[in-house]
Image (cartoon, helix red, strand yellow):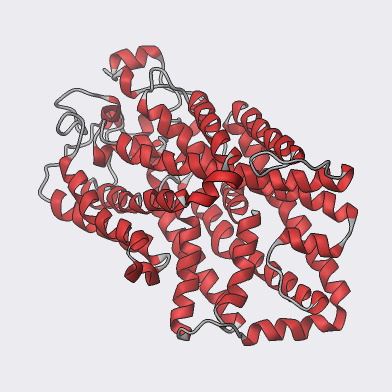
């Protein structure tokens, strides 16, 4: 990738405290991602152990007709597709990551505030997902060598070995750079599909003629859910939207590598509604098969593999679940904090160093997950931090499309001059801060106030909408500087 040279840095008066080569715009000629790479970003996002369990459980948790469940899941895919098309487009056009893009609305210094909130949630869940990925490795090692026993901080020696292996593997992969990560995602996404389809076929063959009646049982819908059908439909849609919310706001971290907006939109179409529908269908068939074979609906892939009792399948599945969980961890929880930390101190923290800091902190989160963190309810605090990030999505979108009319001055995003376009007041846009604070009151209440829990995943959407509305009302009379032709995307 080619970035701005030191000579250009001097000529353009770019502040070194706002710039390093990892944050700099990527020229379109140097981008290598197409629709397939974006598709695999989403494939790895949904095809984790948790993603499968979520998709399968939706068919049996709300007592809703199976076709309605499928429609709700597909609708959520379309909604998320529209959201990321909006948040991803600016980075396709200008080639900068999320923490740089948000400087336009929050100010060149104020951008560190949303970036660090996003980093906190990413680092926490990176540690947790590293632990869950290690359970797949532990499953593999146990199937081959057995478990010697013994326990420390809630994990056996084999569990700790598996955790360290996964932790070190992710660092080694990340250290190779974004291109190596791209190749891993391109390999992991299709592999998960191959194994899931194979598992579906095995379950289908073993269930035989009992499969279709089991599918019919699920499609008739029966559960302890007491709400209305419309309420169930909206709850399923909201749950799926909330599942993808972590990637929605910082989708520009990935689209900056995409060759064109057309490629991004095609990748989002194939990777979201179509991909989610197909993956959910596989989850449905396998879940119905477990009902036919074992007399109960199983939604955890590890439990299903254990009941199938096939050593070759266990080995292949363990490798696949490991790859899938590492994939979502890189996409949702590793790359974003690496950029966010680099944005905090660009002189001293590169993309790699930011990733290393993320990994070190996350090691303690994952290592203490079983014995401490999962027991004390800290995840509720982190979920609250994640919820209050939602207004920044609305602020970014409204600023770019309605306030700036899709025209940004990239050069001044790296300038700390008092008269620069995005300096505002000492680098902070107080109007954006007020818009955030007003809408964050709702976002945090949706997590901590029981009366608002019924909103489910829609709390994120409402928080984002309020952020955009408040920001527009406060900024509509603000004078927006004109774009210098020398800083148009074509000159990058």
Quadrant for the C terminus, please.
Answer: top left
**Along the viewing direction, whichever of 416 and 12 lies nearer the viewer:** 416
Is residue 198 visible to us here?
no
Is 28 or 149 nearer to us in this picture?
149
Which residue lies at the image location 59% right of the left edge and 83% below the top edge? 223
- 386 horizontally vs 146: left or right: left
Residue 477, placed above or below residue 199? above
Total labels drawn = 0
- In front here: 34 or 205? 205
Q: Residue at x 61, y 66 (%)?
A: 55
Choose top left, top right, bottom left or bottom right for residue 363.
Answer: top right
Q: Horizontal and vertical percent for residue 136?
A: 73, 48
At x 37%, y 41%, the residue is: 117
Q: Is residue 489 left or right of residue 40?
A: left
**Residue at x 25%, y 24% (from the top left corner):** 415
70 relative to 114 in the view: left or right: right
């Amino acid at each position: 990738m080619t970035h701005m040279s030191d000579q250009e840095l001097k000529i353009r008066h770019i502040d070194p405290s706002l710039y390093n080569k990892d944050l700099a715009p990527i020229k379109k000629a140097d981008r290598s991602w197409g629709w397939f790479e974006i598709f695999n970003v989403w494939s790895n996002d949904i095809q984790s152990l948790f993603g499968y369990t979520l998709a399968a459980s939706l068919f049996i948790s709300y007592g809703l007709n199976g076709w309605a469940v499928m429609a709700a899941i597909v609708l959520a895919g379309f909604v998320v597709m529209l959201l990321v098309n909006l948040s991803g487009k600016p980075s396709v056009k200008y080639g900068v990551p999320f923490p740089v893009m948000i400087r336009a609305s929050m100010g060149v210094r104020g951008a560190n505030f949303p970036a660090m909130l996003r980093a906190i949630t990413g680092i926490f869940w990176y540690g947790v997902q590293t632990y869950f990925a290690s359970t797949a490795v532990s499953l593999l090692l146990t199937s081959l060598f057995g478990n010697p026993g013994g326990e420390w901080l809630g994990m056996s020696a084999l569990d700790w070995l598996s955790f360290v292996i996964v932790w070190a593997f992710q660092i080694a992969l990340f250290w190779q750079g974004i291109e190596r990560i791209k190749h891993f995602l391109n390999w992991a996404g299709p592999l998960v599909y191959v194994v899931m389809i194979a598992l579906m076929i095995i379950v289908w063959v073993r269930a035989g003629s009992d499969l279709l009646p089991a599918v019919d049982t699920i499609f008739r819908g029966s559960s302890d859910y007491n709400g209305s059908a419309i309420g169930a439909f909206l709850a399923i849609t909201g749950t799926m939207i909330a599942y993808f919310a972590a990637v929605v706001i910082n989708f520009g971290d990935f689209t900056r590598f995409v060759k064109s907006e057309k490629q991004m939109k095609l990748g989002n179409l194939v990777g979201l509604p179509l991909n989610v529908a197909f993956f959910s269908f596989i989850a449905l068939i396998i879940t119905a098969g477990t009902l036919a074979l074992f007399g109960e609906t199983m939604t955890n892939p590890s439990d299903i593999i254990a009941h199938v009792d096939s050593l070759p399948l266990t080995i292949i599945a363990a490798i696949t679940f490991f790859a899938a969980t590492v994939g979502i961890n890189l996409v949702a929880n590793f790359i974003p904090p690496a950029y966010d930390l680099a944005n905090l101190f660009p002189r001293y923290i590169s993309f790699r160093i930011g990733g290393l800091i993320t990994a070190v902190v996350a090691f303690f989160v994952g290592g203490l997950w079983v014995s401490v963190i999962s027991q004390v309810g800290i995840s509720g605090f982190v979920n609250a931090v994640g919820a209050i990030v939602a207004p920044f999505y609305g602020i970014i979108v409204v600023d770019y499309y309605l306030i700036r009319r899709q025209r940004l001055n990239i050069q001044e995003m790296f300038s700390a001059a008092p008269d620069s376009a995005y300096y505002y007041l000492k680098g902070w846009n107080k109007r954006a801060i007020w818009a955030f604070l007003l809408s964050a009151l709702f976002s945090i209440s949706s997590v901590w106030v029981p009366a608002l829990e019924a909103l489910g995943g829609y709390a994120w959407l409402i928080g984002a909408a309020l952020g955009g509305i408040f920001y527009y009302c406060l900024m509509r009379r603000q004078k927006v500087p004109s774009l210098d032709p020398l800083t148009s995307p074509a000159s990058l």
